[in-house]
Image (cartoon, rainbow, N blue to C red):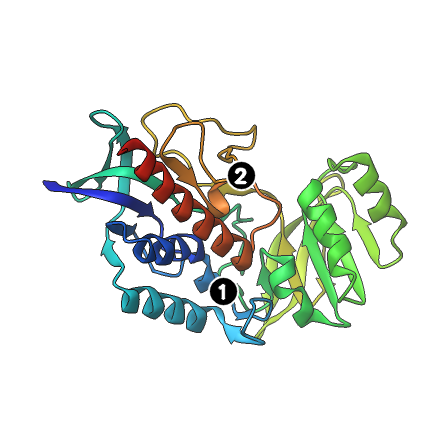
Amino acid sequence: MSNNEVYDILIIGGGPAGLSAGIYGVRSGKNTLLLEGKLVGGQLFNTDVVDNYLGFSKISGFELAQKMEAHVRDLGLKIEMAMVKSIKNGDGNLKIVETEDGHSFTTKTVIYAAGGNPRYLNVKGEEKYAKRGVSYCAVCDGPFFKGETIAVVGGGDAACEESLYLTNHAAKVYLIHRRDELRAKKQIQDAVLKNPKIEVIWDTVVEEIKGEDTVNALSIKNVKTGEVKDLAVSGLFIFIGFLPNTSLFDFDIKKNEEGYILVDNTMQTSVPGVYAIGDSREHIARQVAISAGDGATAALAAGKYIDHIEE
């Protein structure tokens, strides 16, 4: 079913990036629609407590998501719950966004805020202890492990960099890696290996995450010897990769080797009128503040783009 209305700005994704874009789209007087397939708030629902977003010294991810949604709805942002299936070229500068329920929307610009998901270990206890000791964000949750013993899984740049960051809070950090050498850049490896708070556990995988109300141990296995033992920790940070959700485009769009969309300083992609923000774009860190800034930038740029093509 086709909607005959032509939108100025169509935002795909209702996390902090998309909601921020919605604010600036509405405030600029553009006909703006946001499509969200699951929950308005995005990855905030995977965050227990947020204490690094300006104006909120401590707030639950759930509550912050609710406040953001209420804010944009009060401003008059139109939100429809629909899972996007594809983004196609339309007539002229227009784009067509199709959803899995058979609807299609025509728009002058697209702001892509579909985010992504961390790679999971897929081991027993991972889902059970999510937000109760299992985390995928050191900056978000590291401060809650002050003086404690924690573990990090991974061997690439992210795992090593986040291990170093976590030493600012934890008393000890175990870095668990399935191989006998790290994959991170040499400079980062050297910093990890020299840090007295970090102990690397080589040739090892996590087989199970254990606990009561929260995580208190890991079952780990040496892949060379087959030895299995328990490791006492109060938290586990998993950094084995992140999967940006960037597969919806029916046209070529430039990405980096990890699949993140490349943008310029206005958040515009290699395709004029298409913007990428938040966790789907190449960035320095996945943070609410960064995503919100992305959204504001993209919506303001989209408004100027529309004004230009309609001159």
Q: Position of residue 272 (x, y in %)?
A: 38, 29
Q: How many marks?
A: 2
- Is residue 287 visible to us here? yes
Q: Judge by depth and name the residue closer to the eye, 109 or 104.
A: 109
Give coordinates of residue 279: x percent, y percent: 49, 46
Crowding at mark 1 (Cα within 10 Å: few <14, some 14-19, many 20+): some
- Amino acid, disc 1: Lys
Identify the disc placed on residue 137.
Answer: none
The three-letter code of the residue at mark 2 reads Asn
Tell me: 199 left or right of 292.
right
Q: Classify mark 2: helix, strand or loop.
A: loop
* In the depicted structure, whether residue 276 falls above or below residue 152: above
The residue wearing badge 1 is: 128
Identify the image quadrant of the N terminus: top left
Residue designated by label 2: 265
Q: Which quadrant of the rendered structure holds the C terminus?
A: top left
Residue 155 showing in the rendered view: no
Q: Residue at (86%, 42%) from the top-left corner?
A: 190
